[in-house]
Image (cartoon, rainbow, N blue to C red):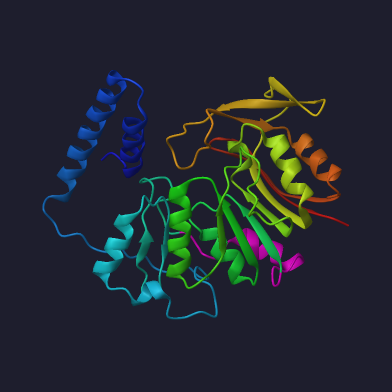
Amino acid sequence: MRTRGDLLIWVNRLFSSSNVDEALAAEQQITKIVADVAQNFDGSEPIVERSELAPNSLPKGTKDYPVSRLSDEQVLQLNSLLPWAAVTLDEQQRHIGSPWSDIKRATPQSLVDKRHVALNKVYPFAGKHVLEVGCFEGIHTISCMSLGARVTAVEGRIENLLKTLTRLWCYDYRADVKRWDLEEEAPADIPSSWDLLHHVGVLYHLSDPVRHLQHVLSRTSEAVLLDTHVATDAAAATASYEVNGQTYAYYHHHENTSSPFAGVRDHAKWMLVEDIEQLLKSAGFNDIHMNSDRIERNGRRITLWAFKK
């Protein structure tokens, strides 16, 4: 069975196609996917999917979420209204949202992120102002707020803003959600500063990561949580570009802009770890902790904390 993700990609290509042949090819692919999906329904009634709650998957201290008061029929309607790409659970173990595919974001995600729990032990979130760069569908937004933070969540894609606002309502949270295309200058309504920069899964989608980092780090007063893909090593960083008279090597990564997991430009620059660390130090973040440095399916990825002394 073709995935829901495939369908959304081809629909996007159909609407953005620049000539008749491209549009026809996209229309043919959509027809094939729809026919494949239809065979699997076989006239059966749609049902709300349920999964067992994982330990600590819901924020503590809050009961009777607004989404839990919805009927199964209303949850089905909620899940069909937006192009969801991730799933969380309510107190009745019902799926809120839907997976992107059978293999990507296919299982329910915890609303209490383990990276936040670990950082919270050395840098308590309570009372802190967090800038969340790339809020996607609001899952990390809720996790930060469940630990007591005030969150400004920014996102460039309109559909992700809507999904974030909807998921926040589902679990009775309120955040300051704003649109910001991170490839452009910050809009005037973005706060001038924040305590913690939450930068997870975004930097490796940007075509100008150096200027972006310089900008957001200059407005961060205390700490950084950064999780990103990077160039494997200097040998892999075969391209380079110049920012303010300094040259930065990078790995050129193609971006499929029709995917909600991609950036909004046709390529991204994956930086060298040493350049990221130097940018942090130049902004005053001299206390850097490399929490994870691993090889994933798409390449090398790191998670680090950085603090101003």
Left or right position of 66 against 157: left
Q: Residue at x 27, y 68 (%)?
A: 74
* In magenta stretch: residue 116: yes
Figure check: 140 above or below 5: below
Q: Residue at x 27, y 24 (%)?
A: 25
Figure check: 209 above or below 152: above
Which quadrant holds the C terminus? bottom right
32 or 195: nearer the viewer: 195
Which quadrant holds the N terminus? top left
Left or right position of 226 against 201: right
Seen as rendered, the residue at the extreme left is 43
Start and end of the magenta stretch? 109-127
Q: Position of residue 295 (x, y in %)?
A: 61, 38
- Residue 231 visible in the picture: no
Q: Which residue is drawn at 76% across and 52% down?
A: 219
Figure check: 3 above or below 177: above
Figure check: 57 above or below 44: below
Write down the quadrant of residue 251 in the picture: top right
Seen as rendered, the residue at the extreme right is 309
Q: Where is residue 209 in the image (x, y as percent from the top left)?
A: 68, 36
- Residue 139 visible in the picture: yes
Q: Where is residue 217 in the image (x, y as percent from the top left)?
A: 76, 48
* In magenta stretch: residue 222: no
Q: Where is residue 165 in the image (x, y as percent from the top left)?
A: 47, 61
Q: How many marks?
A: 0
Write down the quadrant of residue 151 in the picture: bottom right
Left or right position of 172 against 100: right
298 or 266: nearer the viewer: 266
